[in-house]
Structures are given as C-alpha cells and as structure tokens.
Image (cartoon, rainbow, N blue to C red):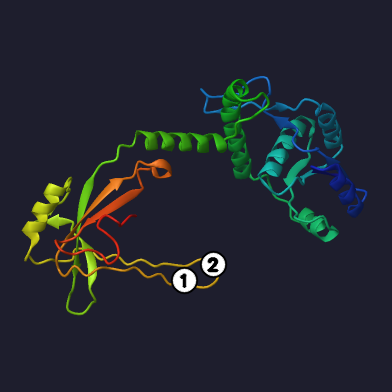
C-alpha cells in the first residue's frame, strides 16, 4: 500500500521521510495553501458570513505537486501541526487534492514530537479532520478580515500606510474610547450617607450604614436633608439588615498588617458626603471624596472634619 504523508514544513518532511519505509512519500504544504482573496473582502456578509477561499498566489506549484503525489497514493495521511491552523491547513489540502484522489482514503494523524516512535504511533492510530477546530480557525480568520479589511484603510489615511487593524485591539480601542467619553460626560453629583457606630450584646463595636428608615430607602441629596434625618434618628433603635463577609489576600512576600483608626462617636449617627472629584487625574465617576460631619464638639484627633477621602 502506497501512503502519502503531508506535513507543513519541508524540513519536517525530510526528517519524517527517514523514519518511514519505501511505501511512504512525504510532501510539505509549506504552510497555508488557501486563504481569503487580497483584492476583495472575500466574506459573503449577506449569506451567513460564508468565506470564499482561493489558492494563495505563488502556491500553484505546491498544489500541483500534492495533486500529482495524491494520484499515486492508496492512503493519504494529513500530518499538519496539531492546532487550529494545522487543522485548517489539513482541511484545505484535502479539498484541493480531492479531485485527484481515486479510491484513496484520507486520514488525519497527530504527533507532538518529531521522533520515530511518535510518528509511527500516530500513523498506526489515524483519525479524521476535526471540523470544530477548522470552524474555530475559520471564524477567527473571518473576524480578522471583517475588522482589518474595513478599518485598516482608515489607519492608512489618518496615521500611516501599512498599518493593520486587528480583531482584538480594534474592539479594545473602542471600549476605551467609549469609557473615556463616559468619563468626560460625567457630572459630579453630591449625595450623603449616614453611618453609625453600633454595639450589640456579643460582637465588638462596628460601623453600619443606614439604608432604610421606616422601610423607605434613603437617598440624601444635601446637608439639610442629612441634618433632619440625624435629628429624627436620635434615640431610635437600630436593626442590622445585612452583614457582608469578605476574604482578603495579600500579595508579595511577607504578610502586611493594616490598621485603620476609627473614632468613637458613641451611638450617634454621622453624615458622610460623597462627591465625584472632577480634578486632574482623579476625574473619574468612580473616584469619590468623603467629607464626614461629626456631632457638635467632636473632631478626629489631629485631623479636621472633611479630611477623610476615598
């Protein structure tokens, strides 16, 4: 039985030919033999994005050699690289030589090392072309073409000729630009939150944020509203609606201990104003400053009111 083994690299073809007997012929595809045309989009957008592959310019002699060898073979073994690109090359090779095959069977063989043992083992256990891998490579190629073919000319006009736009960086750039527009359009808005230092029967004192009052969600917009709510809360009981537990991990060599000073405000709530910074490098909607309003006569040691910032 005459067998034809097709690999990608001519150097691999020479090495593998030494390991196989006289009944084996080893040929190389020299990489891809088919691709989308350079002169047009090559993707039918109206017909389920069907790609239109053609033989790459300059690869006609290679295709002719593969077809000629396929005519003389009883079995064809596609031994291109074991990845998506290799699977697509195997599928394209099978397509171009299909008209030259009479009764020969076509198989796919996979090996991860160029050793006699690995190659003979792969040939003893041939399989079929993995259509899923071929589709994955084809989808990536179509995306490259749809993005690059239509956006690259804009780069040539605006930046420099010869640049290409890819499927990854083009989308990433758009996300960055959209986020930057949101940041520029952001208008800092003042709002206040109310926190209280509470103490239960068993746990230590803890700080809690006021979410509801009389089953009504709070959205405090200014100082006047905060003061009214503070006055109304004096002497009223509190209940904890939700407790969040979070795990923290430290990176680096030695663990670092962090200490945060908390002032004792008794059981009186404290109003906290949060506002967007809107200044310099902090001009971001997610960057907030906090100004704490302490009860009359109380200040943090060594720091004045409004000194807290997040």
Location of residue 123 in the rendering, given as x and y in whole percent from the top left corner: 79, 53
- Is residue 170 shown above or below 306? above
* Rendered image quadrant of residue 229: bottom left
Residue at 25%, 65% (x, y): give it. 300
Residue at 20%, 67% (x, y): give it. 197
- Is residue 287 shown above or below 195? above
- Is residue 94 shown above or below 57? below
Identify the image quadrant of the C terminus.
bottom left
Location of residue 256 in the rendering, given as x and y in whole percent from the top left corner: 46, 71
Query: On the image, numbered disc 1 is attached to which residue?
Result: 256
Location of residue 263 in the rendering, given as x and y in whole percent from the top left corner: 25, 68
User: Is 287 on the left or on the right of 218, as rendered?
Assistant: right
Assign a secondary structure to mark 1: loop
User: Marks 2/1: CA distance?
Assistant: 9 Å
- Is residue 214 shown above or below 285? below
* Rendered image quadrant of residue 112: bottom right
Q: Who is closer to the viewer here, 234 or 309? A: 309
Query: On the image, numbered disc 2 is attached to which residue?
Result: 252
Q: Who is closer to the viewer here, 147 or 26? A: 147
Q: Residues within 10 Å of mark 2 (few under 14, many from 20)?
A: few
Assign a secondary structure to mark 2: loop
The reply to whether callout 2 and callout 1 are in contact (CB within 8 Å) is yes
Instruction: Say if residue 1 shows up in the picture.
Output: no
User: Is 24 on the left or on the right of 96, as rendered?
Assistant: right
């Amino acid at each position: 039985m005459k067998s034809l083994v097709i690999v990608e690299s001519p150097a691999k073809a020479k090495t593998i030919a030494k390991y196989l007997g006289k009944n084996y012929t080893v040929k190389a595809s020299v990489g891809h033999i088919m691709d989308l045309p350079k002169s047009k989009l090559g993707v039918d957008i109206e017909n389920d994005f069907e790609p239109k592959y053609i033989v790459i310019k300059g690869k006609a002699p290679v295709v002719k050699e593969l077809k000629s060898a396929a005519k003389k073979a009883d079995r064809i073994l596609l031994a291109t690289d074991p990845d998506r690109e290799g699977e697509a090359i195997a599928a394209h090779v099978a397509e171009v030589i299909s008209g030259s095959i009479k009764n020969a069977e076509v198989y796919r063989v996979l090996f991860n090392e160029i050793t006699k043992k690995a190659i003979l083992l792969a040939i003893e256990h041939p399989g079929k072309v993995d259509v899923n891998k071929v589709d994955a490579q084809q989808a990536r190629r179509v995306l490259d073409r749809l993005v690059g073919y239509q956006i690259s000319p804009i780069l040539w006009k605006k930046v420099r000729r010869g640049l290409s736009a890819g499927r990854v960086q083009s989308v990433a750039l758009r996300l960055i630009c959209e986020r930057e527009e949101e940041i520029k359009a952001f208008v800092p808005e003042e709002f206040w939150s109310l926190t209280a230092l509470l103490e239960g029967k068993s746990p230590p004192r803890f700080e809690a944020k006021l979410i509801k009052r009389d089953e009504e969600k709070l959205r405090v917009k200014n100082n006047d509203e905060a003061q009214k709510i503070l006055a109304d809360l004096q002497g009223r009981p509190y209940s904890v609606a939700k407790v969040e537990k979070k795990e923290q991990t430290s990176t680096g060599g030695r663990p670092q201990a962090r200490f945060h000073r908390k002032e004792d405000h008794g059981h009186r709530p404290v109003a906290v104003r949060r506002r967007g910074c809107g200044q310099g490098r902090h001009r971001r909607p997610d960057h907030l400053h906090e100004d704490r309003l302490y009860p009359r006569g109380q200040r943090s040691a060594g720091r004045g009111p409004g000194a807290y910032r997040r």
